[in-house]
Amino acid sequence: MNKTMKKMSTLASAMLLTTAIGAAPSTAQEETFKVGVVSFLSGPAAGPFGIPARNAAELIIDAANAGTLPAPYNTAGIGGAQISTVVIDENSKQKNADFVKLVEKDGVDAIVGYASSGSCKAIAPEAEKLKTLTVFSICGTPQIFEEIVTEPQYLFRTLSHATMDNVAAARYVVETMGDVSTIGGINQNYAWGQDSWRDFSLSVASLKDSVTETETQFPKIFAGQYGSEISALLNAKPDVVHSSFWGGDLEALIIQGSGRGLFGRSQVVLTSSDTAIPRLGAQIPDGTIIGARGLNGPYAPETELAEWFQKAYFDRFGTEPVSPAYQMAQSILAIKAAADQSNSSDPEVIRGALAGLTFESMSGEVNMSLANGHQAITATAYGTYKFDAASGKGTVENVRTYSAGCVNPPANVGSVDWIKGGFEGAVCE
């Protein structure tokens, strides 16, 4: 059913309801809500990022259709409509054309996904132009709503942007390393990496102004080899090395950096690294500071919804979910929460209900409180890595959790201004 037909059906159902209270329900159960799912299905980001995200989409949508999700999501479908999907590869050279095809040829009602900030910078204006409900599940650059789409109507992001990750990382470093005096970094040379280093270095400066920067490296994304950058950091000898590397780049940095002694020379902070735990295990040096971009993976809360997700994911895929899986699930639950609250599968109604919504996810509470209700804030956590040889599994210890109000800027305040202003209004428990 295309959007026009769906709206006519919704209107017809509403008219029937007003003239025949108590009559049989409308045909909502026969409707389909078609979702475009975009994730890395090929390339270096597929294994650690894209496939877990796609798996989570399949798991959540199957459970939603069957009505077997835990409360408050234990009603079938989205707004009563069964969910169908069109899954496409984010690792495409024609991302905008793929997006247009999902909307104009496949006739999707909503689109979820996207991991790369580069992808999101390209798609954000397209979503508004085509007036299509689009929920970014991962990409982190604050630029999306602070610079690119400043008055969003159709675009949402259900994950905190990168400012959260890097303010929390800076707080963790300053709180746990009393003698830190120098910092360096290695980050991918595009919006995500540049913004991450900016927010981390500015945050450290705001928290401890005696800290100085030594060496900063910005290799090309998906470069895969970091010999010269690691040499530069070894020569500079910063107390802390910050990196927002993710996917295959992250795993390459861990393997190459630990082999060269970088992790022993400096305290390494990896802001998006829980994905490497099940894949690298003992290859991650103990003591590495691990981030998961929210309360995901080893930082997930002990709730019925989180425990259901972890068990259902492991039973189906034979491995524990990592942060991209949590984040994809969160984006789908956002649509379902808004649809169920408004009792509608009409995308126009759903986007109205989603703006400013607070909903529960397997990663805790999500508040759509920034960018006129289109940008989420959540809590996050950091800890240090510890590999358990007996169980053959990695975990985290020395965990510190930061509330959403502590590490995200207030509404109507830009990230950089907030950090440079000393985090005015931050509420840290």
Image: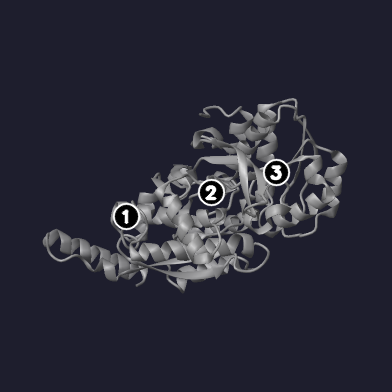
Residue at horizontal 68 percent and vertical 64 percent from the top: 44
Q: CA distance from mark 2 to mark 3?
A: 17 Å
Q: CA distance from mark 1 to mark 3?
A: 41 Å
Q: Look at label 3 and name its amino acid.
A: Thr
Question: Circles 1 and 3: CB distance less than 8 Å?
Answer: no
Label 3 sits on a secondary structure element that is loop
Q: Look at label 1 and name its amino acid.
A: Asp
Question: Circles 2 and 3: CB distance less than 8 Å?
Answer: no
Q: CA distance from mark 1 to mark 2?
A: 24 Å
Apparent side of residue 86 relative to residue 338 in the rendered image (left or right): right
Label 1 sits on a secondary structure element that is helix
Mark 3 nearby-residue class (10 Å; few <14, some 14–19, many ≥20): many
Q: Look at label 2 and name its amino acid.
A: Asn
Give the position of the N terminus as an image quadrant. Answer: bottom left
Q: Residue 377: x percent and y percent?
A: 49, 42
Where is 94 relative to 287, above or below? below
Q: Is residue 28 visible?
A: yes
Choose mark 1 or mark 3, whichever is in front: 3
Residue nearest the viewer, comparing 95 with 89: 89
Choose mark 1 or mark 2, whichever is in front: 2
Please identify the residue farthest to the right as the structure is shown. 235
Residue at horizontal 60 percent and vertical 44 percent from the top: 162
- Closer to the chain start, of discs 2 and 3, is 3
**Residue labelled with disc 2:** 296
Q: Residue 418: x percent and y percent?
A: 58, 32
**Residue labelled with disc 3:** 288
Where is 172 relative to 264, above or below? above
Q: Residue 238: x percent and y percent?
A: 80, 37
- Closer to the chain start, of discs 1 and 3, is 3
**Residue labelled with disc 1:** 340
